[in-house]
Image (tube, grey):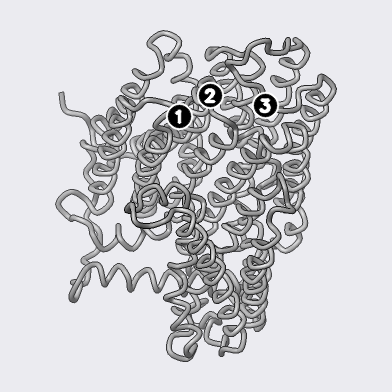
Amino acid sequence: MRFPNLLATKNGRLTAFFLLYVTEGIPLGFAATAVATRLRRLDVGPAEIGAFVGSFYLPWAFKWAFGPVIDVFSSDRWGRRRGWILSTQVLMARTLLSTVMLDLPQQLGLFTMILLLHNTFGAMQDVAIDALACSTLHEDERGLANGMMFAGATIGTMVGGSGVMFLSGVTGFQPTFFFVAACILAVTAFVVLPMKEAPGPVRVAVAGSKLVQAGREMRVFAIDSFRSFLGSPGAFGGLAFALLPAGAMCLGLALQSNLAVELGMDDDQVALLGLWSSILGAIFCVLGGYLSDRFGRRRTLFVYLALMSVPVFYLMNELSRFGWIMPVSATAENRPQVPAALLTALWIATLAYSVFQGLMYGTRSAIMMDVTNPAVAATQFTAYMALMNLAISYSATWQGIAIEAWGYPTTMMVDGIFGLACLLVLPWLKRTNGASNYADDLGPKRARGMALVLGLSCLAWAPYSYWSASFGAAKPIMGTLFTVVFIASALFLLASRAVLAESGGWPARLGAWMAPLLLLLYARYYLDAIATWLPNGIHAASFVASAQNAVAVVAVLAGFLMLALRSQPWQKMQVDSAVLA
């Protein structure tokens, strides 16, 4: 039997992109719900689970880097985008199946690294699918197609989360890995393989190394993104909005599944809760987008984001009222009796949160499009989406740490309040009318201001590391905050080198070398583990102390380098008026 080429018809294209997005949602639902629930039942702590879920989103925060690689290294025979989708889906299945025999929780570190690689292939697939959609969908199909793509991702999350949970009650947890891999490969076999991607325009032959060409395209991406982000108040506000949590986030991450396990819900009950949450989220996403078109995006988004904190505060109050403060081991003897009213409160809070989060999702992407320069839309919008994934990653990480340090109610209070911070940015996110409004004369001033803030933040690492013990339970959370600072500073330095080129002088040249060192500072969390791999002649404690001093030196040097960049000729980062035409 020969399967049809779904790209040949309108209904086929809508179906194809719906199913392709299902494969994107499956691994996210599998990690955030099924695996997180399983780990909590195995008595893995919330901090470790939060770090696991947070690391899972990291590849999506850097997916913009895959674009030039996918554009340059492509095959006309297999399809410029289709070839990448095929290969990444097969690699997703293979990496997932390689974890079947791992022993959890003893091999959680290796499990996390393999699934991180698995999700890296998922992020690469997402870039290829979006590129295929841009080149294949007709203009009058794009609105409906985007709605169906989001619905597909929601269904995929439900399959990877609730579907796996239901199945594990029958087969056990390990066989569900085969189910998830089979779902991905089914789309590969029945959708991707029969596809016939239309030939794209004739490409200019790459002169020299394709890897060098990909590097050139990444440089262009950096320049376009940097100029677009700082070119107007709306775009700059969008940058801040993307980096902040989109409302309270804890009931959409591992905290909810951790709490469900501790309150005695079995896998079927957790799966049922996830099923209804996904259904409500998908329905209200469509409704939220419709209402935002009718009543204005900023006004409706303000309401949706504010409402997301309400169920969080409600559940926080109920947990405090019943005295359920700190995490309780799933295997502990003499576990406290769970009040039925507390389980009811979890259901009410989770479902209400899904409604408000769905309303938000249906509007957030649209408002980011409003502030995006159409001339560089792919570049700017992709970067916004990547930064939003970074916000999810650091939120999952700090919340896992905070639960063990402060308990559930305090963590939820901080999340609910911090989630409202993005409301302060909303007034900047005005729809831009007219190409000339996508850039103003204040871009250089914004660049200097960003260099100042990031520079001072990097310098703050030195006094913080000296007095870090005084932060007590908040110390790991401060560490997460500095991780975000170091990543943002590294990206700023790379973009500065690309934008300023030789006119940036020694600060820009040195910044290109300093950026990788800033990214490597993430290894500070693993110094003790690395010390165990050292040869016998090296003293582990001395190595750790020397490495910590090196971290401080890199942070301080990066801070001074950032301050030096403030005096450079930032006029070069302004968007050329010809580009806006």
The residue that disc 1 covers is: 30
Question: What crowding class fits label 2: few (fewer than 14 Cα within 10 Å), some (14-19), or many (20 or more)?
Answer: many
Total number of numbered discs in the rendering: 3
Image: 481 above or below 558: above
**What's the residue at 71%, 21% (across, down)?**
346
**CB atoms at circles 2 and 1 under 8 Å apart?**
no
- Please name the amino acid that badge 1 sits on: Phe
Give me the disc on residue 327: 3
Per the rendering, the mark at residue 37 is 2
Query: Which mark is first along the chain, 3 or 2?
Result: 2
Q: Secondary structure at mark 1?
A: helix
Residue 202 at x, y = what percent? 21, 66
Q: Residues within 10 Å of mark 3 (few under 14, many from 20)?
A: some
Question: Residue at 54% across / 23% down in the picture?
Answer: 43
Please, what is the three-letter code of the amino acid marked with disc 2? Thr
The x and y percentages for residue 532 are 39, 47
Residue 485 horizontal side relative to residue 177, left or right: right
Sequence order check, earlier mark of 1 and 3:
1
Residue 423 rendering spot, x and y as whole percentages: 76, 53
